[in-house]
Amino acid sequence: MLMEIFGSGCANCAKLEAHAKEAAVRLGVEATVKKVTDFGEIAARGIMSTPGFAVDGQLLSTGRVLSVEQILRLLQEK
C-alpha cells in the first residue's frame, strides 16, 4: 500500500503522516508513506488545500488532518 501525504512539510503534514503510519500498524498492513512537497505535483493532483492524503493513487482527503480513526475507516472502506 502506498500512502501519500501532500503538503509543504508543515506541522499538520507531519501529524497526518504520523497518523497514517499508526493506522497502517493498527491494521497490520505494509505501507510506504511518501511525502509530496512539490507544489506543481500537488496542484496537478487537484489539491487546493493541504495537507492532502491519498492511498494507492486515490485522493481521499484534502485540507484537514485526519485522525488515526478516520484513516482506519477510509482504509477499511477501500
Image (cartoon, rainbow, N blue to C red):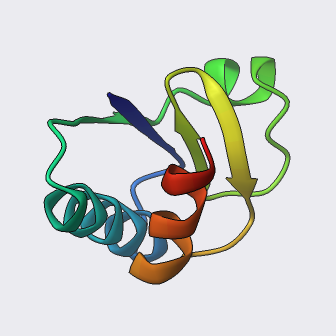
Q: Which residue is found at the position 62% from the left and 51% from the top?
A: 77
The residue lying toward the viewer, choosing from 42 and 56, is 56
Residue at point 50%, 51% (across, down) = 75
Q: Is residue 3 visible?
A: yes
Which percent across, then down, holds residue 10? 43, 66
Q: Is residue 29 left or right of residue 73?
A: left
Residue at horizontal 42 percent and vertical 67 percent from the top: 16
**Most foreground residue, 11 or 29:** 29
Location of residue 22 with respect to 21 vertically, above or below: below
Q: Residue at x 68, y 73 (%)?
A: 64
The answer to whether 60 is drawn above or below residue 11 in the figure is above
Image coordinates of residue 62 in percent, x first then y, are 74, 56
Residue 23: image x %, image y %?
30, 65
Which one is nearer the viewer's eye here, 45 or 56? 56
**Quadrant position of residue 72:** bottom left
Q: Give the quarter of the figure containing the C terminus.
A: top right
Residue 67 visible, this angle:
no
Q: Count how many numbered circles sit on residues in the image.
A: 0
Q: Is residue 74 left or right of residue 55?
A: right
Left or right: residue 32 versus residue 49 is: left
The residue lying toward the viewer, choosing from 69 and 13, is: 69
56 vs 47, left or right, is: left
The furthest residue to the front:
76
